[in-house]
Image (cartoon, rainbow, N blue to C red):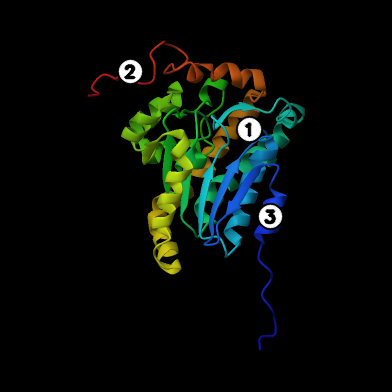
Amino acid sequence: MSLQDFLPTPKFEEYSRLFSDFFTMTRRDDGVLLVKAHTRGGPIQLNVQNHRALGQMLKTVGADPENELLILTGTGEEFMMDSDPEGFRLEEEDLEHWAYEYAYKDGRINVSALVNDLEIPTIGLMNGPGFHTEIVTMCDITLAAEHAVLFDLHYDIGSVPADGIHNAFQELLGTKRAAYALLTGEAIDAQRALEYGLVNEVVPAERLIERAFQIADHIMSQPRTVRRLTTQIVRRPWKRRIMEDLDGGFGIQMFGHVASRHTIHGRSHIRSTVDYAREGRRNNFDDAPPHTPLPGDS
């Protein structure tokens, strides 16, 4: 008999309650876990608290050996189109402290945990329009609702787009398309996201979770070791991308914040910036809807 015992692993009944203010969690008997991010039961309103909770949740889920597959999505008809009215007071009170403690540190953990701390397959669901889409596009498989719109708001709010969204866009869109999306805030509708390779399937919103479970059933048809080792193979490009680009990009973004010495995450600022995506326009500086063909598109 060993001189020491294994430390206990997290228990679903306990952490599902612990995270309930941020995520609704349900798990089937076979270990397929559905996690729906929310703010008070509705679409995600970004704040420093749920920004930190994401990485904490991913690490906890990854540490529970009874989890076999993660389906991650938002709540309601939008994914993330707003910020908490008081959610970034810390940024206003102490910009330098916020930039490291709540942005740089927590943000790097969020992205890294999604790629490195989960041994299980992941399916991300874009349940509606929103920013910070790296949360779902960096999952192994990504589905989008028909009304989903993917875009990055950072440049338009005066921030360097380098906190993980640049990793997702550059890896999936390629250099030229990523540059256009990051510099213009291009609103990419679901069908164009499918054509670009940002998502794998586009389905009606009411069938999004059902379709995710269908795919999960197929993945679960193979033995546990095969599933988990295959996950490590398909995730290798993300691991390389994160290792090479995440920390440096995040550092550049935070330098930009501190150097400019102004806060950017106020609710009215973000809400007015993303209005164009709500209105079906391609960006903030012209009136072309996102489905208008670009020159050279068929």
The numbered dot on residue 254 is none
Task: Please give the residue where the numbered disc 3 appears in the rendered image.
Answer: 15
Front: mark 2 or 1:
1
Gap between marks 3 and 2 measured at Cα: 45 Å
* Image vertical order of residue 264 relative to residue 71, above or below: above
Amino acid type, residue under disc 3 in the picture:
Tyr
Gap between marks 2 and 1 measured at Cα: 31 Å
10 Å crowding of disc 1: few (<14), some (14-19), many (20+): some
Gap between marks 3 and 1 measured at Cα: 20 Å
- Residue 89 visible in the picture: yes
Front: mark 3 or 1:
1
Give the residue at x 31% y 33%: 195
Relative placement, left or right, of 260 versus 173 is right
User: Which type of secondary structure does the marked residue at label 2 adopt?
Assistant: loop
Q: Residue furthest bottom?
A: 1
10 Å crowding of disc 3: few (<14), some (14-19), many (20+): some
**Upstream in sequence: badge 3 or badge 1:** 3
Residue 241 coordinates in the image, percent (x, y):
43, 47
* Image vertical order of residue 296 relative to residue 190, above or below: above
- Residue 105 visible in the picture: no
Residue 1 coordinates in the image, percent (x, y):
66, 89
The numbered dot on residue 42 is 1
Task: Please give the residue where the numbered disc 2 appears in the rendered image.
Answer: 292
